[in-house]
Amino acid sequence: MGITRDYKDTINERVDSDPAFTAALLDEAVTLFLNGEPDVARLVLRDLVNATVGFEALALEVNKPSKSLHRMLSARGNPTMDNLTKIIGILRNQLGLDIEVHTKPTHVA
């Protein structure tokens, strides 16, 4: 049985209707980066950019070609810290969100 709906459509609709879901996507992307999973984090950011700002508008904001941004936010992308900070900052501002980082002890078995 094939997929009946593209997951991107689901994400776009949920972002449009659920601010908590949108905030959770940004939170998850940042958490993934900080916890050593940049490949997945870039893909989450890519979905969030597609559902909110869009790559063309983002390209104007960061003064980079949209194709470069698509590559940066692919699973094998390699954005610089400056570019990543700009992208996250633009998303944060666009969504009206602030980011707080908290640490907690690791669980030792």
Image (cartoon, rainbow, N blue to C red):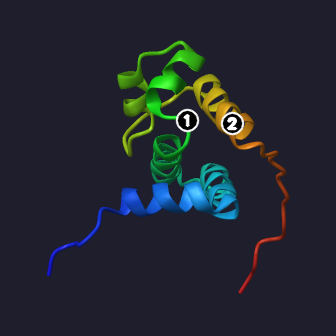
Query: For the N terminus, which image quadrant?
Result: bottom left
Do labels 1 and 2 touch, CB within 8 Å? yes
Q: Residue at x 60, y 52 (%)?
A: 29
Farthest left residue in view: 1
The residue type indicated by label 2 comes to: Gln
Describe residue 102's horizontal placement relative to residue 51 as left or right.
right
Q: Position of residue 55 (x, y in %)?
A: 45, 30
- Residue 36 vs 6, above or below: the answer is above
Q: Position of residue 77 (x, y in %)?
A: 41, 36
Query: Which element type, helix, strand or loop, lies under badge 2?
Result: helix
- In primary-sequence order, the first of circles 1 and 2 is 1
Quadrant of the rendered structure where residue 4 is? bottom left
Q: Residues within 10 Å of mark 1 (few under 14, many from 20)?
A: some
Query: For the C terminus, which image quadrant?
Result: bottom right
Q: CA distance from mark 1 to mark 2?
A: 7 Å
Q: Residue at x 66, y 31 (%)?
A: 90
Q: How many marks?
A: 2
Q: Please give the residue where the numbered disc 1 appears in the rendered image.
A: 53
The residue closer to the viewer here, 21 or 32, is 21
Q: Please give the residue where the numbered disc 2 appears in the rendered image.
A: 94
Describe residue 61's horizontal placement relative to residue 11 as left or right.
right
